[in-house]
Amino acid sequence: MRTAAYARYSSDDQRPESIRDQLRNCEAHAKRLGWGTPTAYADEAVSGSLRDRPGYQQVLEAAKARLFDVLLVDDLSRLSRDQVETAQTVRLLKYWGVRLIGVSDGVDTERKGHKLEVGLRGLMSEMYLDDLAEKTHRGLMGQALAGYSAGGLPFGYRSMSTDAGHRREPDPDQAPIVLEIFQRYAGGHTPRAIAADLNTRGLRSPRGTSWSQSAIYGDMKRGLGLLNNPLYIGQQIWNRSKWEKDPLTGKRKRRERPETEWVITEHPELRIVPQELWDAVKARQKRISATTRQQRAAIGHWAQGGRAPRYLFSGLLRCGECGGSFVIVDRYRYGCNTHKTRGNAVCGNGKTVQRRIVEQRLLAGIKAELLTEDAYQAFLAEVTALLKQAQPDPTAGRQQLKGAERERDNIMAAIRQGIITPSTKAELERCEARVTEAQEVLQAMEAFEPTQVLPRAREIYRRLVQQLEDIEDVAEAREALRELLGEVRLMPADKCLIAEIKTGGLAAACQISLVAGAGFEPATFGL
């Protein structure tokens, strides 16, 4: 009997010995039944509510491949603590011909009535997690009310361990940076400029990476971003949001709680930012927000749900230095978005180029390649294949002809037997006409040759290529360019940008290699 064993311990119970204990129980059970040593699969410090556990996925793949006949677990909760996931997994194992045995809880899918037992134990496992989450939340609320840390550690603070829990205190190295950011923003600096300067100085963001404008500005309504954290004025807000698992994708999503559920405590010793400075920052944020609303109102429906890309190469251009997107940085020019939002320290490609020049030079190179003989032959082959797919089936024509001939023959047989009526002659003439028509249609079907349908294919193809930039549907044209070009990287060079195209689709057959350095204008700075 081929056997396997799966073991898991949760992140809330950090005991690596638990894996050994579970596998030992499974091995002992297999030995008592005279089976071989089970193949071991395990997940360490992973919650049973998650589906994307490496060991769990491996054991499912092995079961699907029929690599074992019996799967042993110490108890059913080791397999999963999600009721629906447990039931689905048991159903899959049964379908794959794998017997599931819970060594400690006695579950055995070969036994009659196992569905009821699996359902009850799956429900109990899920309720255990719900109860654990409730108790954990209650404990964290007590910590928050007592002034202890009940969540993450914001930038500007360090954690100090005490007998009752962890307390925060201002970090002497990071707190001055927080104060500087507030002062500079209140003084008129943009989050983008502040982030660029911090990156230039080699300072790390709260996540340990480079700074971005979103890490500074964030979201006022949701309290996200450095400028919106009230802890900097000594006010701790806990229980502002919660995380819920999407039952379809299994991914966690943040949900905002109503303000009535927030736990707000005052901690003057944690203040880093003076009240006057905080109020100045909030006032500037409100002014900018009001201006943005007015601008959106002015452009009407474009403001709803974001605006789709407006230009031919929007979304197709990448920075050759950092790999970030090349986007419209003002009304007329493309530039590296990473350089714009994070500064020269993260990406040194500060060159920009007029949108008009990008479209002219790239389209000129694309046209030159598409007008080659190889490109035309590829186009002709594709059109020919599509026409062949649309070609009528001669079988239907033959059946139509056979039916018309049968009807004509029946009338002729009736005439030979002396069955003649006033309408016989007219009906015979109609049948003869249908036979002739069916013969002509069948001959056209059998003689169909796709290349004959496009006697001016080369002329049509050339006209389509020449008018590429005149397409009115920009979105459709951009998707066509995406299929042709794949990805366009703009490499910074001496006083120019060089476009390198890694092609795909039809362009791959044409081996496009476009160098547009001569057509791009000299580098321009001052973003």
Image (cartoon, grey):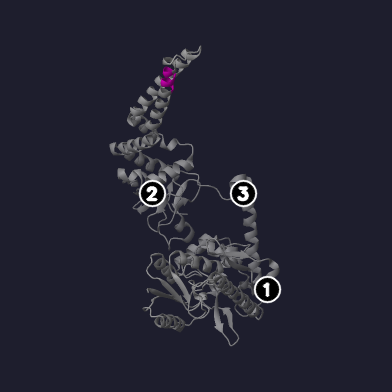
Closer to viewer: mark 2 or mark 3 = 2
Name the spot of residue 504 as percent of width and height, x first.
Answer: 35, 48
Is the stretch drawn in magenta largely helix, strand or loop?
Answer: helix
Between the C-alphas of marks 3 and 1, the distance is: 34 Å
- Determine if residue 43 is in view: no
The residue range painted magenta reads: 407-413
Closer to viewer: mark 2 or mark 1 = 2
Name the spot of residue 196 as percent of width and height, x first.
Answer: 48, 62
- Determine if residue 195 is in view: yes
Q: Amino acid at mark 3?
A: Arg
| In-image side of 343 versus 377 (left or right) | right
Q: Residue furthest top?
A: 422
Q: Residue furthest right?
A: 260
| In-image side of 450 versus 209 (left or right) | left
Res. 264 mark: 1
Between the C-alphas of marks 2 and 1, the distance is: 51 Å
Res. 486 mark: 2
**Residue denoted by label 3:** 296
Q: Quadrant of the N terminus?
A: bottom left
Q: Amino acid at mark 2?
A: Gly
Give the answer, above or below, for where 375 lies relative to 305.
Answer: above
Foreground pick, 381 / 155: 381
Sequence-earlier tag: 2 or 3: 3
Sequence-earlier tag: 2 or 1: 1
| In-image side of 405 versus 77 (left or right) | left
Between the C-alphas of marks 2 and 3, the distance is: 33 Å
